């Protein structure tokens, strides 16, 4: 029969489906001193976590027991990025393989706050040959870092140093999949656990769980005809009695029991009973097809093997690692911890061209959140086929929705893992995608196997294979598409004033500048350590400024790739940024309740203004650069004098968080919107309320004056609707409805003819502003679309989403009628200017400003560009006349 797994592995397999994390058989503090914390890097051996160092602490911190790796830079974990809540509010958790009879009586063993209540013995039946119990002092404390992209970004650049440190300076012999990065913990103050394995199916047992002043007691009794392996562990052991915590051997028809006691209650919850973690695996060679060898139901040992139960999760798990049906003699047990995340790492390596795979346990929980937790995890992963995202550095991750998995886990009403003996069929439907789809590059061709006589040159082979992969990737894809640039959600987006460049930021801390004509990557920066909340180009488009949750703002040279400045003056997240139209000033707004005004030439702080009593949500300069407006969570919008830093007007009246503001073209009026379901329009000079627009049932997140005249105002609400109203009377002109979820943002096209919207229903929609007709729906994204923007020239429409993708659409994609009209007008122009055709025959290049992207073509490109230039002049002249009329009317 296959070798029995270690008891800590049985325990881990049994309680993992509870989805609190990886269960630790030994939750004791290392050396009675070192606590398992978020940011800790270490290994797991024999069911216990052993630290190497804490990546979230300085190098000279006393807790760095073994020192730190070379080139060490700590991960900046902001307090707002840590989620904390209480879980496991009842004292007893047990596996799905244990069927309750009167186990509910055990709940009386302890009240939720852990006070004394004696409980009696409760009966259960073993559904399988294995089972596990956990008794603890409730409630347990959960803490987790929710920013997955920041961790992935940090690991991909530091993982090699970690492994070198472990095996070099620390003298360990760890493989790469034995390194763990902790991003979440579940801790209690006292605990006792038990696991059993043997011929126990359909056998009866009893459990007694008690919380006492002196400690806690866990006692398991099993009746079996054969010897049954039952073991206990408990903690903390400091101040305990001398009882033997392990079950003595039993045989025949017997009953075995054991009681565990703890004499002193620890002062705090520092015993880590569940662990959330990340792991990484690098592609050393063209990996063999590991996942193809993963056992499915048809590969389990045959039913006539008396010693193996095909419904037993342990037996199934053993078949995965063996990859064979053959029987094994019991041999030495490996100290390596059972870890299902390894299957995700293998899946990424086998089904993408990733040079490095990074995955976490919460990826698994998110994959299986809507189905029973599977027994055969590799087969379930292959059935679901989750998409793989590979970034520009070759790091591959699973693209999966963590929105449910990241929420506080619901308490199990019966205090046990949900049944899993017969996994339900997976109902998801997935397209059989071509090889290489996952990262938009063709799959590499595997080299022929090395002969036995060939010298072992593994290092050289690895380098050569990496080089071949890079060359194949470059040959097949000379530029990186915008759809696959970030590893995290897209959190900011802005165009250059000439529409040739697009800058995007992500919660992975990266900034990318794209060429909008071919979607190639021009620049990429990874200097920020947290979410990029705002990006803005200088008026001449030569510089880009970025604002981040890491409390810094930076300025970059677009032309030279140089970081020009780091502006440090805020003490918390910088949520908003703006650059004045005269190019002299940069404004920033922060969660530290301040608005800062910076000199844009020397990057020094000019003014620091206290902006109310809550975080700043948005900042915007007036077109004449005289005013800087800031909105705040204290229900107020403030207008500041840029030159002096003095408060010009405080616009008070909203009854909820003010999210956004917008100046009209003459800077006479300013519009604001808030959580109170209203948008308001104010006089900039006097601060007088001119108009209260109340067209929505929910919070209003965006408000914008219509270009080019400001006669209309667009409001975007989380009630799944948008409205266009008269900006002078407030009367509703158009209502835009059709999204199936919350609308995150909306915008006018530069000519005011169209409105685009981005929604949590994964779509971008294009509307005609005149009558509200829905023209097109774009469904390219695979997660919530949080931003959408037209290029200033009106020739592109771009969106960014939580799936990390950016979509750049050209004018012909979203407005075929306009493209057709331009083509017809151009033909008319061509008939009138036939004499120019011979002169331009053979021209293939169209310079900037001459209709690039519209008039490119052989022979006639410049003529079409010339027509386009005349056409734009006519439009501008028309806009100027309309603007003059409005000014005269005013």
Image: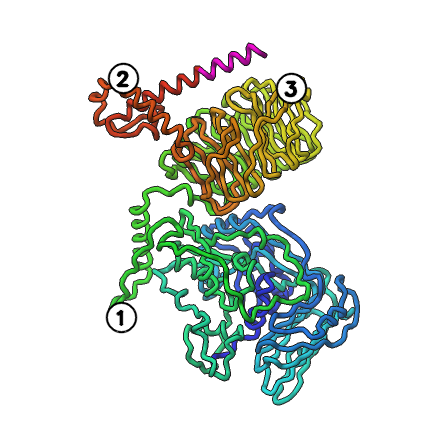
Q: Which span is picked out in magenta?
A: 878-890
**Residue 128 among magenta residues:** no
Rendered position, 15 above or below 308: above
Which residue ends up furthest to the left in the rendered image? Answer: 838
Q: Which residue is mark 2?
A: 832
Classify residue 383 as left or right of residue 125. Answer: left
Residue 66 showing in the rendered view? no
Q: Position of residue 861 (x, y in %)?
A: 28, 26
Secondary element under disc 1, as helix, strand or loop, is loop
Q: Position of residue 176 (x, y in %)?
A: 45, 61
- For marks 3 and 2, give the one nearer the viewer: 2
Q: Earlier along the polypeptide chain: callout 2 or callout 1?
A: 1
Secondary element under disc 2, as helix, strand or loop, is helix
- Viewer-nearest residue: 736 or 150: 736
- For the point 49% across and 23% down, which residue is it? 583
Classify residue 508 as left or right of residue 419. Answer: left
Would you identify the image quadrant in which residue 730 lies?
Answer: top right
Query: Are discs 3 and 2 less than 8 Å apart at CB?
Result: no
- Viewer-nearest residue: 859 or 622: 859
Q: Which residue is mark 3?
A: 683
Secondary element under disc 3, as helix, strand or loop, is strand
Rendered position, 331 above or below 699: below
Q: Position of residue 658 (x, y in %)?
A: 65, 32
Classify residue 590 as left or right of residue 853. Answer: right
- For the point 57% across and 78% down, which residue is it? 129
- For marks 2 and 1, give the one nearer the viewer: 2
Residue 718 showing in the rendered view? yes
The alpha-carbon separation of the residues under discs 1 and 3 comes to 83 Å
- For marks 1 and 3, give the one nearer the viewer: 3
Q: Residues within 10 Å of mark 1 (few under 14, many from 20)?
A: few
The alpha-carbon separation of the residues under discs 3 and 2 comes to 50 Å
Q: Residues within 10 Å of mark 2 (few under 14, many from 20)?
A: few
């Amino acid at each position: 029969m296959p070798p029995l797994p270690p008891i800590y592995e049985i325990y881990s397999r049994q309680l993992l489906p509870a989805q609190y994390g990886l269960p630790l058989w030994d939750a004791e503090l290392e050396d009675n001193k070192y606590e398992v914390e978020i940011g800790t890097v270490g290994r797991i051996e024999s069911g216990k976590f052993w630290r190497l160092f804490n990546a979230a602490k300085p190098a000279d911190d006393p807790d760095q027991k073994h020192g730190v790796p070379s080139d060490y830079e700590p991960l900046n974990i902001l307090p707002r990025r840590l989620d904390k809540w209480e879980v496991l509010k009842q004292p007893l958790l047990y596996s799905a393989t244990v069927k309750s009879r009167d186990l509910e009586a055990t709940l009386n063993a302890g009240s939720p706050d852990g006070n004394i209540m004696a409980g009696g013995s409760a009966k259960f039946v073993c559904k399988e040959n294995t089972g596990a119990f956990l008794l603890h002092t409730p409630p347990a404390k959960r803490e987790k870092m929710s920013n997955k992209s920041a961790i992935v970004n940090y690991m991909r650049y530091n993982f090699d140093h970690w492994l070198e440190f472990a095996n070099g300076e620390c003298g360990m012999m760890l493989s790469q999949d034995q390194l763990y990065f902790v991003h979440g913990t579940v801790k209690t103050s006292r605990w006792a656990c038990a696991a059993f394995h043997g011929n126990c199916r359909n056998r009866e047992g009893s459990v007694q769980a008690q919380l006492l002043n002196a400690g806690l007691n866990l006692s398991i009794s099993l009746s079996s005809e054969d010897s049954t392996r039952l073991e206990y562990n408990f903690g903390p052991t400091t101040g305990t009695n001398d009882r033997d915590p392990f079950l003595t051997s039993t045989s025949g028809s017997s009953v075995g029991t054991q009681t565990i006691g703890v004499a002193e209650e620890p002062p705090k919850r520092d015993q880590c009973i569940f662990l959330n973690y990340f792991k990484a695996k690098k592609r050393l060679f063209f990996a063999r097809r590991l996942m193809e060898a993963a056992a499915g139901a048809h590969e389990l040992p045959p039913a006539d093997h008396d010693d193996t139960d095909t419904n037993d999760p342990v037996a199934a798990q053993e078949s995965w690692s063996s990859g064979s049906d053959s029987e094994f003699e019991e041999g030495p047990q490996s100290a390596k911890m059972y870890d299902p995340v390894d299957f995700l790492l293998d899946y990424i390596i086998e089904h993408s061209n990733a040079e490095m795979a990074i995955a976490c346990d919460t990826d698994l929980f998110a994959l299986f959140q809507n189905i029973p937790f599977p027994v055969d995890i590799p087969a379930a992963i292959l059935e679901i086929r989750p998409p793989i995202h590979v970034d520009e550095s070759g790091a591959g991750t699973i693209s999966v929705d963590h929105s449910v998995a990241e929420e506080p886990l619901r308490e199990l009403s019966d205090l046990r893992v949900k049944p899993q003996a017969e996994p339900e069929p997976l109902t998801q439907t997935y397209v059989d995608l071509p090889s290489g789809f996952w990262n938009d590059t063709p799959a590499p061709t595997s080299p022929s196997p090395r002969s036995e006589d060939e010298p072992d040159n593994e290092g050289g082979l690895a380098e050569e294979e990496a080089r071949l992969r890079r060359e194949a990737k470059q040959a097949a894809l000379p530029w990186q598409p915008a759809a696959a640039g970030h590893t995290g959600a897209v959190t900011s987006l802005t165009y250059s004033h000439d529409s040739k460049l697009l800058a995007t930021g992500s919660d992975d801390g990266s900034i990318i500048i794209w060429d909008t004509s071919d979607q190639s990557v021009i620049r990429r920066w990874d200097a920020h350590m947290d979410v990029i909340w705002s990006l803005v180009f200088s008026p001449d488009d030569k510089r880009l400024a970025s604002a981040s949750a890491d409390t810094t703002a930076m300025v970059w040279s677009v032309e030279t790739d140089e970081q020009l400045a780091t502006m440090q003056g805020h003490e918390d997240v910088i949520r908003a940024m703006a650059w004045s139209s005269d190019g002299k000033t940069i404004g920033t707004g922060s969660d530290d309740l301040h608005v800062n005004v910076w000199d844009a030439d020397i990057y020094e702080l000019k003014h620091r203004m206290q902006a109310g009593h809550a975080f700043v949500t948005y900042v915007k300069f007036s077109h004449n650069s005289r005013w800087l407006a800031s909105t705040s969570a204290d229900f107020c919008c403030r207008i500041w004098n840029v030159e002096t830093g003095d408060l010009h007007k405080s616009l008070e009246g909203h009854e909820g968080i003010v999210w956004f503001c917008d100046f009209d073209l003459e800077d006479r009026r300013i519009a604001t919107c808030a959580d109170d379901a209203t948008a308001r329009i104010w006089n900039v000079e006097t601060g007088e309320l001119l108009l209260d627009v109340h067209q929505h049932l929910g919070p209003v997140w965006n408000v914008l004056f219509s270009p080019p005249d400001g006669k209309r105002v667009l409001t975007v609400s989380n009630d799944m609707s948008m409205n266009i109203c008269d900006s002078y009377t407030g009367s509703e002109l158009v209502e835009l409805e059709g999204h199936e979820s919350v609308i995150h943002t909306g915008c006018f096209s530069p000519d005011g003819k169209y409105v685009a919207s981005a929604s949590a229903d994964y779509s971008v929609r294009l509307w005609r502003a005149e009558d509200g007709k829905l023209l097109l729906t774009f469904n390219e994204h695979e997660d919530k679309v949080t931003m959408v923007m037209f290029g200033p020239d009106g020739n592109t429409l771009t969106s960014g989403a939580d799936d990390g993708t950016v979509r750049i659409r050209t004018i012909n994609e979203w407005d075929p009628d306009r493209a057709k009209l331009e083509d017809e007008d151009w033909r008319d122009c061509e008939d009138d200017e036939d004499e120019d055709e011979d002169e331009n025959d053979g021209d293939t290049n169209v310079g900037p400003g001459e209709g690039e992207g519209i008039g490119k073509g052989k022979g006639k490109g410049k003529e079409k560009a010339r027509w386009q230039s005349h056409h734009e002049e006519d439009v501008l002249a028309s806009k100027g006349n309309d603007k003059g009329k409005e000014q005269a009317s005013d």
